Amino acid sequence: MSNLLEITLGIMTAMGGFVDMSELVFTAQAGARFLYALIWVIVLGTIIIIVFGEMSGRVAAISKQPVFNLMRQRLGLKFGLIVLVAASIVNLITCAAEIGGIGIVMQLGLGIPYRLATCLATIALIATVWFLPFKAIERIFGLLGLFMIAFIVAAAAIHPPWNEVVAGLLPNIPAHLSGNLLLTYAYFVVAIISAVVFPYETYFYSAGAIEEHWSKKDLMVNRLTTIVGFILGSLLAISILINAAVLFAPRHIDPQMVGTSAMEVAIPFGKVGLGFALLGMFFAISGAAIETCLCVAYGPCQFFGWKWGRYVRPSEAPRFTLLWIASFVLANLIVLTGVDPLNLVEWAVVSAILVIPFSYLPLLLVANDRKYMGEHVNGKIANFCGIGSFAIVVVAAIAALPLYFLTSGGQQ
Amino acid sequence: MTPDASLKLVGEVRDLQIVDADGTHCGIADELEFEGDPGKKLKVRAILVGPGAYQFRLPKWIFSIFKRAFGDASVTIPWNEVAHITGRITLKRPGGAYGLLKAEKRYAQIVRRIPFA
């Protein structure tokens, strides 16, 4: 019974923690601009994150090696160092974007000035990570992020054209698109893949598996959490896109602000809906802020072999502690410069896709190494999915920068 | 895997996490030191841990940044102090016995000054 509860909580946590700023921004914009045509990209991204999430959990449980440790071992010190620096910058920008998002939600919900809200949020997040153990942080924010289910309820209530929704599940390019619009569509394909498979999710998941001392007996939990949890989480992202297609597209509203997404629930359900949407967004984005910030600290600690983790007192993993505190402070300072959180999200998404292949390659190599993985080495299906997913993220990474510049960050 | 087994050293030992007898993370196997003469069997003498071991692994300009930030000290752990090797290298004794974990202790003093530490 306790095992069943553990699995259920794990799945619900994965679901509640699936959506962050980047998905809120890009899926809402995708729905408003291209209706249901980009749903298949969320599905594709979900398959990729399931494949690599499962692999990272399995590798952590069997070989006890977290992602940045694998990076160094498999990519070598020099190249690994370049990837570490790049990944840390991406994680820091993402953390800043999430803190900016929390500031906007607090401003909308409580009427607190934006900059004061981000400072209060940063202090609250630091206190949360300082006082709560890893599992409590993961569970609290993941489960409270389930307020986001309001977006799914809204999608059902506004009666979208389900035949068009189902058609959007299959890869397609709308016939009327050409020239710049086609490039923008391609940019959104890359951006949504990046937003769904953000590298910090794998870093955090793998670190969590080690913090919780996963072993062979946890492999089933790992598989169920990644497959069921991420599929349910992707329903949240799909519902945000559907709501935007139904509510924003006909009115030519381009949801440039994260707050606009909350209107998706407010329109059908009024103030109560708005409250649920803002609460869901607050906890989902806060959870992502904590995860990205911890990942900034995981990076150097795992790469250089320093003690890390929230399973020990802060003074027992001192460099890790100082790094995550500094990350929160730095991320908030970035926000306080006045940079638009939407720009931060765009930079984070475009730069993340460049780092993703180099984060996933070491995982794929170790998951195929029988010396480390024994009987839990990748099978044929895992390899087919792994190599296929890797090829997709490589293509997306190559296309990301040219598409970003050609479309001025999807604004054309 | 035991330390006297045949190992692909660079691929399988260098850059592995080191943990001491208490399970504490003590750094990474940053470099390996060998002994032997031409025509004779090559053996690992020790593992080097610390930024000083990066001297011949990183371009000079990157190493100079490391040197300024973290110093150029390195700790030598005799190979016979390795208990076993899996996805990590486990040592026979606590890290302090080899001179490891000094930086951790320094940083711990800073963290202890933070309220509620």
Image: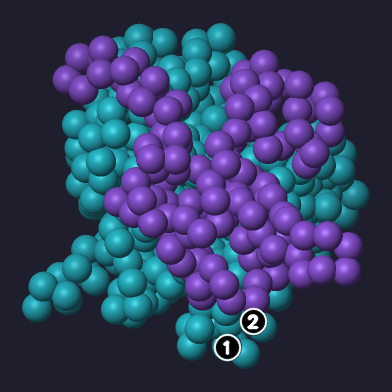
Q: Mark 1: which secondary structure?
A: loop
Q: Nearer the viewer, residue A389 or B117?
A: B117
Q: Amino acid at mark 1?
A: Gly
Whether marks 1 and 2 lie on the same chain = yes
Q: Mark 2: which secondary structure?
A: helix
Q: How far across and how far down the image is residue A161, in percent?
A: 50, 67
Query: Are the residues flagged by discs 1 and 2 in contact, CB closer than 8 Å?
Result: yes
State the residue position of label 2: A383
Q: How far across and how far down the image is residue A221, in percent?
A: 31, 74
State the residue position of label 1: A379
Q: How far across and how far down the image is residue A287, in percent?
A: 35, 41
Look at 50% across and 66% down and name the residue there.
B85
Q: How far across and how far down the image is residue B45, in percent?
A: 64, 55
A121 sits left or right of B31 in the view: left
Residue A216 visible? The answer is: yes
Q: How many marks?
A: 2
Numbered mark located on residue A409 in the image:
none
Look at 84% across and 33% down and name the residue there.
B59
Q: Quadrant of residue A271?
A: top left
Residues packed near mark 2 inside 10 Å, few (<14), some (14 to 19) or many (20 plus):
some
**Which quarter shows the C terminus of chain B?**
top left
Q: Which chain is cyan?
A: A
Q: Which chain is purple?
A: B
Can you name the residue that lies furthest to the left here? A1
